[in-house]
Image (cartoon, rainbow, N blue to C red):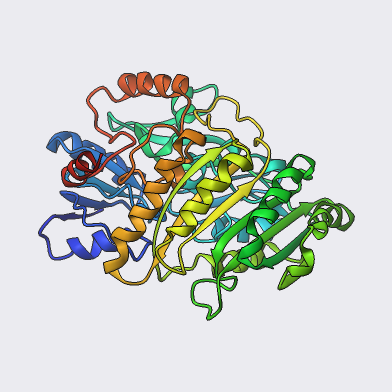
């Protein structure tokens, strides 16, 4: 394994390469360990115990807050563990923590199978599944963590164990939804796959911003009648063609149906053709046939690499009457024409048996800061975290996979009962605190937050 101590020639290159985002937070682990196999992970954990270093685990580095990058301790980079095998007959896959959603579905689709990955192909599957996993076709196949059958994990004692619902069940329970604070380093994920949907259709609508409230209220009222095959994403104010496009911002509705037949997909999407202001739509692309690869390409244009990002969010079941003022205030305060609000409308996703996952709501509101100049970082961080904080009274929780855990530490991504259980398991399986807990940040950031409060 490669080991770079702070001050070594290769340290800064390894530190920056660990972060997918062009935003490279000024947080500096004492040592960065790049593991190439599970034995390296065992050795790294034992080294951390020997040197009294707390471990933070990094999979593919997609987390926009880079919460895996902390001051001091060990950054254990598992991005090179890229095992990928599929058992077509068993409809299952075994992957390493360095595998992206696009990697898995490329192989799965070739075998007539599918996994409900994140919408962007470059999101790592380990972090995705362990933080819950809002992905494709979630109302049909469930969250990513609902499809996590088992894990192989290196414990705080430096032992490699297997964990499923019958063997060492504490670890897989914690991995299903509480990943950033897991008391171990997962080196292998065992996933359930599903038959490839027979029909995939995408509708795309663009509305002027002056009718966003009417469209949002209409869509929210329709939500209870959505097909389980339908997912609806609303972005505003946003450049419809992505951040590089030379066009005005607008309200964008992207709706996908993944169904067993074209008739079912068309019926799922037809409901969106009856918006009361449909005549004002400047783009009205209805039920375009797509492949999984084409869906990835479409999503990738909206959140491409090559920009600086921050992200914070709430999960809520609040009514439009309660949310519209909060959304209006956030949009009035937006720092530039790249940053935007991304909202996902749905019913409660199906439950996840034996899981830490415990945040439910009918709307997921993301505050997405996007910028190109380092000088704009503070303005975007302030916007995303302040407005997420202002919306907390309306929230049922936070989705940890898209939370700004450093600037706005929160524990609301688990129910109080599940968080209490999580902490008991941490005390049981990692009594010496070898692995970092959920919320971390530099002392300087913590002092700044306290002063602002």
Front one among 422 and 191? 422
Give the side of residue 174 with respect to residue 271, left or right. left
Decide if residue 99 is in sight here.
Answer: no
Residue at 18 percent of width and 60 percent of height: 11
- Residue 185 location (% of width, % of height): 36, 39
Residue at 53 percent of width and 78 percent of height: 245
Q: Residue placed farthest to the bottom in the image?
A: 246
- Residue 175 location (% of width, % of height): 46, 34
Snapshot quadrant of residue 451? top left
Front one among 435 and 156? 435
Q: Residue placed farthest to the right in the image?
A: 263
Residue 198 vertical position relative to residue 354 in the rendered view, above or below: below
- Residue 347 location (% of width, % of height): 68, 38
Residue 144 vertical position relative to residue 206 in the rendered view, above or below: above
Front one among 87 and 438? 438
Snapshot quadrant of residue 214? bottom right
Residue 276 vertical position relative to residue 225 in the rendered view, above or below: below
Residue 381 vertical position relative to residue 398 in the rendered view, above or below: below
Decide if residue 210 is in sight here.
Answer: yes
Snapshot quadrant of residue 82? bottom left
Residue at 38 percent of width and 61 percent of height: 20
């Amino acid at each position: 394994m490669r080991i770079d101590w702070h001050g070594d020639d290769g340290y800064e290159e390894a530190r920056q390469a660990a972060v997918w985002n062009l935003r490279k937070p000024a947080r500096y682990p004492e040592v960065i360990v790049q593991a190439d196999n599970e034995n390296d992970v065992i050795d790294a954990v034992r080294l951390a115990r020997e040197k009294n270093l707390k471990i933070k685990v990094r999979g593919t580095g997609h987390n926009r807050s880079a919460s895996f990058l902390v001051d001091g301790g060990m950054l254990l980079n598992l991005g090179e563990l890229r095992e990928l095998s599929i058992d077509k007959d068993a409809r299952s896959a075994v992957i390493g923590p360095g595998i992206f959603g696009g990697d898995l579905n490329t192989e799965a689709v070739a075998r007539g199978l599918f996994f409900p990955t994140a919408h962007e192909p470059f999101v790592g599957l380990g972090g995705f599944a362990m933080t819950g996993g809002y992905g494709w076709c979630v109302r049909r196949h469930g969250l990513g963590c609902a499809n996590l059958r088992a894990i192989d994990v290196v414990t705080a004692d430096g032992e490699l164990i297997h964990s499923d619902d019958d063997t060492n069940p504490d670890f897989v329970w914690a991995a299903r939804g509480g990943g950033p604070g897991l008391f171990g380093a997962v080196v292998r994920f065992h996933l359930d796959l599903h038959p490839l949907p027979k029909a995939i259709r995408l509708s795309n609508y663009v509305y002027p911003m002056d009718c966003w409230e009417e469209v949002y209220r209409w869509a929210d009222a329709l939500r209870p009648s959505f097909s389980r095959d339908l997912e609806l994403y609303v972005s505003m104010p946003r450049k419809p063609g992505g951040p590089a496009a030379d066009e005005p911002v607008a309200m964008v509705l992207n709706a996908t149906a993944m169904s067993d037949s074209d008739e079912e997909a068309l019926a799922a999407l037809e409901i969106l053709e009856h918006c009361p202001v449909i005549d004002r739509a400047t783009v009205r692309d209805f039920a375009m046939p797509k492949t999984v690869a084409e869906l990835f390409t479409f999503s990738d244009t909206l959140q491409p690499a090559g920009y600086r990002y921050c992200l914070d969010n709430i999960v809520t079941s609040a009514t439009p009457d309660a949310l519209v003022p909060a959304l209006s205030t956030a949009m009035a305060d937006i720092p530039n024409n790249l940053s935007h609000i991304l909202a996902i409308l749905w019913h409660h996703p199906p439950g996840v048996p034996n899981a830490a996952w415990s945040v439910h709501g009918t709307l997921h509101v993301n505050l997405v800061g996007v910028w190109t100049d380092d000088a704009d970082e503070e303005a975007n961080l302030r916007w995303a975290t302040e407005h997420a904080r202002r919306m907390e009274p309306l929230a049922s929780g936070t989705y940890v996979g898209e939370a700004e855990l450093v600037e706005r530490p929160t524990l609301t991504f688990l129910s109080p009962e599940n968080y209490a259980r999580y902490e008991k398991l941490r005390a049981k399986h990692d009594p010496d605190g070898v692995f970092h807990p959920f919320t971390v940040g530099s002392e300087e950031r913590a002092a700044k937050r306290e002063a602002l409060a």
